Amino acid sequence: MMASLNGRTVLITGAARGIGAATARRLASDGAKLVLADQDGAGVEKLAAELKQVAVKADVTKPDDIARMVDEPYKRWGRLDVLFNNAGVIRVEPLFDVTEAEWDRVMDVNLRAVFFVLQAVAKRMVKQDVMPGSELRGKLIQTASIASYRGGNHLMTPYSASKAGVVSLTRSAAQLLAAERVTSNCVCPGAVETPMWEQIDKEWGALEAWDRGRRGSAGSGTSHWGGRNGRRTWRGSSPSWRARIRTT
C-alpha cells in the first residue's frame, strides 16, 4: 500500500497537460498540496482551478522564473517535499536536418532547465527538516525516457540525447544528496497517449508522407499500417510502432 500523501507539498513542471497533468490529478486526489508550473499560463490556471491547487506561469529556461516558481511552495507552506521535474519538448526531424537552433532548443528545455530546476530545489531541500513520518528531507524526480537508453532513432536524436543527459544528472544528484537525506530518481516512460505523442504522430506522418492506412514496409519485416479512430497502428512481423519509437 502506498504511503499517504496527505499534506505533502509537490512542485510539478510541465503541469498543464500530458504526464504532468495526469500526475497532478492523481496526487491531488491522494491529498498532496501542489504548485503546478507551466509556460502555458491559461492551461495551468485551468487545471489548478479544477484541482483547487496553486498555478504558476513559468518558463523553466529563464532563471528568474525558476527562482519564482521554486519560491512559491516555500512562501505558502514553508517547505517543498517533492519535485517532479517534468517539462520537456520534442521534434521529429532527420539527423542530417537538425540545426544548431533546434538542438539548443531541445537541450535548453530537456536538459539545461532540468538541471537548474533540480539545483535550485536541492539547495533548499538540504536545509529543511525531514518530512513528517519520513527519514527523508525531500525527493527529486525527473522525467527521462526509454529513449535515454535505447536511443537509435535518428528522427529524435536531440530528444534522445537530452534524456540520456537527464539520467546522468539524476545519478550525479543521487550520489551527492543521499547523505543529505534527499533522493534523486527518474522515470523512463515508453509511449504514452499525450499531446506530445500526438505531435510525434503528426510530424512523423508528415515527414514520411504516410497517409492513414497506407501500406508499406519498415524495419526488417513486411507490414502495413492500419487505423482505428484515425490512429496509425502497426501490423506485421517487425516490432510494433511503439517499440520502434519509444518516447514520453
Image (cartoon, rainbow, N blue to C red):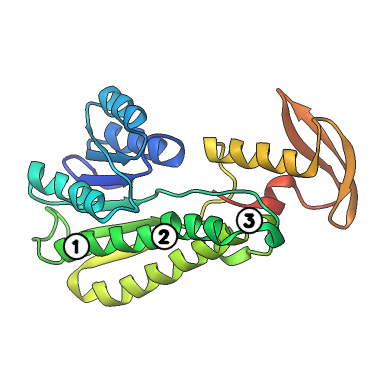
Specify which label sits upstream in the sequence, 2 or 3. 3
Q: Is residue 166 left or right of residue 61?
A: right
Residue type at the position of mark 1: Leu
Q: Do the residues labelled 1 and 3 touch (CB within 8 Å)?
A: no
In this orientation, does residue 74 appear? yes
Q: Is residue 219 left or right of residue 178?
A: right
Cα distance between the residues tagged 2 and 1: 17 Å
> x%, y% of residue 27?
30, 38
> x%, y% of residue 55?
24, 34
Cα distance between the residues tagged 1 and 3: 37 Å
Other residues around mark 2 within 10 Å, as few (<14) / some (14–19) / many (≥20): many
> x%, y% of residue 107?
47, 60
Residue type at the position of mark 3: Met
Residue at 25% across, 72% down: 177
Asked if residue 134 is positioned above or below residue 43 in the image, the reply reads: below
Rendered image: mark on residue 218? none
Secondary element at tag 1: loop
Asked if residue 65 is positioned above or below residue 130 in the image, the reply reads: above
Residue at 7% across, 49% down: 78
Residue at 70% across, 56% down: 94
- The residue labelled by disc 1 is 136
Cα distance between the residues tagged 2 and 3: 20 Å
Would you identify the image quadrant in which residue 108 lies? bottom left
Secondary element at tag 3: helix
- The residue labelled by disc 3 is 156
- The residue labelled by disc 2 is 186
